[in-house]
Image: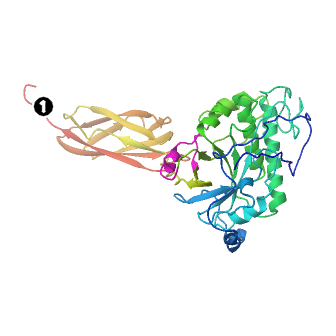
Amino acid sequence: MQLSPLTAVPLVRSITRGSSSVSHHEGSMRRRLFLTLSVVIAVLTAVASQGSTAAADFTSGPPPGGSSGHDLSWPQCGSTFPVDGAFGIVGVADGRAWSANPCLASEYQWAAGYPRTPDLYMNTANPAPHSSYYWPTSGAQDPAMCQDATSTTDPGCAYDYGWHTAANALATANAALGALPQGVWWLDVETGNTWNGDTSSNAADVQGSIDYLLAQQVAGVGVYSTAFQWNTITGGYSAANASTYAAAWRSEFTSPNGISASPSWVAGASGPSDAPSYCGSSFLGTATWMVQYISGSVDVDYACSPPPPPPPPDYSITVPSSISGHPGTNASNSVTVTSTNNWSGTVALSVSAPSRLTATLSSTSITVGLNSTNTVALSLRSGTTGKYTVTLTAQPASGSTTLATHGASLSFFVYRKAQGA
């Protein structure tokens, strides 16, 4: 993927209203550092030998962890394609929003030679407050409310532009590929493109593209960028602060998706040795699927191993290992229930003790908040000396996110006071 030196004419223009002028930088793109037009490795005959793969043979989702693939776009038109790797990704545009990669079909055929369904990526931009391709009018809901189309910071207008930019990219892909299967769509977000809005409206633009593609039931939508560029453009829009952005947009639109389900594709690794270390550096605060680096003149995409699934919500019950008392007197201590792994809820407590021992709980039900603790008192009494084993059992209420029953036990020692004590 690389900045085009030519003026591209989009093949598909779904909406063309708005100003007739366009920013000189709109949709410009500088992928890879000085990526050349040649791809070193093997020959076009290898692509022919790969052939096209039937949709039934494809798999989608994250690439196999530890594997590597390549991404191609218009700079590789007419050059040889890589024959190594485990997957392929293809650019739909020529490096700018509202444009078309003239080699999309042939590069898709190359990517289809791998077992994984080819992913696609599109370019993004925010040329507010006008574009020769599409810009909403004040008061329009297309689909978000655009309150002030003359503003560079109106989030609803930017959302609409992102929505229709994605619509154009998907129409371009469908025109070139027909009914061929498409994998995950990636949004290319880089400072080399035009971003005239503030960070909130720029993030709304990206959200518009995500929401359009998901509304068309694509396999998924991720974001390609670096932490620096993403933070510069969107102010660091992420799963952690998405609610703040959503609140700022609420007067004009509410996204049904947000950003939390979008994986990241991180650029900027220097090579295969440090690519794995980028797998934990998602600028979105979501899972990082791939890390990109350049090998010679070839884009290489290292697939991160998926993180282990989070441990299930749960809780624990604890009591002291032993307590002691004297015949005929009460001995008390605490029973503690602790939430773990984001569990919250109510558990029913019961206590079992020998017949010569009276065991009483101050409450047989205890409610615990998210990642917190709560306690009840346990009172023990016996008129006979000796060692007694007391067992406590906790059972979550129906509908809890965990149905695990937990227990704990303690030893109760009853002994007589020494004479004179």
Q: In which quarter of the image is the C terminus?
A: top left
| Residue 206 can be seen, yes or no | yes
Question: Residue 29: x, y in percent?
Answer: 72, 43
Q: Quadrant of residue 317?
A: top left
Residue at the spot 20% in from the left edge and 40% down from the top edge: 413
Q: Nearer the viewer, residue 79 or 195?
A: 79
Task: Please state the extent of the stretch shown in magenta in the rendering.
Answer: 271-291
Question: Residue 158: x, y in percent?
Answer: 79, 34
Is residue 290 one of those drawn in magenta? yes
| Residue 255 can be seen, yes or no | no
Left or right: 258 in relation to 339: right
In this rendering, the count of numbered labels is 1
Question: Residue 135: x, y in percent?
Answer: 86, 36
Q: In which quarter of the image is residue 202?
A: top right
**Residue 91 vertical position relative to residue 367 in the rendered view, above or below:** below
Left or right: 167 in relation to 347: right
Residue at the spot 39% in from the left edge and 33% down from the top edge: 376
Residue at the spot 40% in from the left edge and 33% down from the top edge: 375
**Residue 399 vertical position relative to residue 118 in the rendered view, above or below:** above
Circle 1 packing at 10 Å, graded few (<14), some (14-19), many (20+), is few
Left or right: 134 in relation to 289: right
Q: Nearer the viewer, residue 82 or 339?
A: 82
Q: What residue type is labelled 1?
A: Lys
Q: Nearer the viewer, residue 180 or 320?
A: 180
Circle 1 sits on which residue?
A: 417
Q: Which of 188 and 358 is in front in this view?
A: 188
Left or right: 162 in relation to 134: left
Q: Is mark 1 on a helix, strand or loop?
A: loop
Question: Residue 250: x, y in percent?
Answer: 75, 30
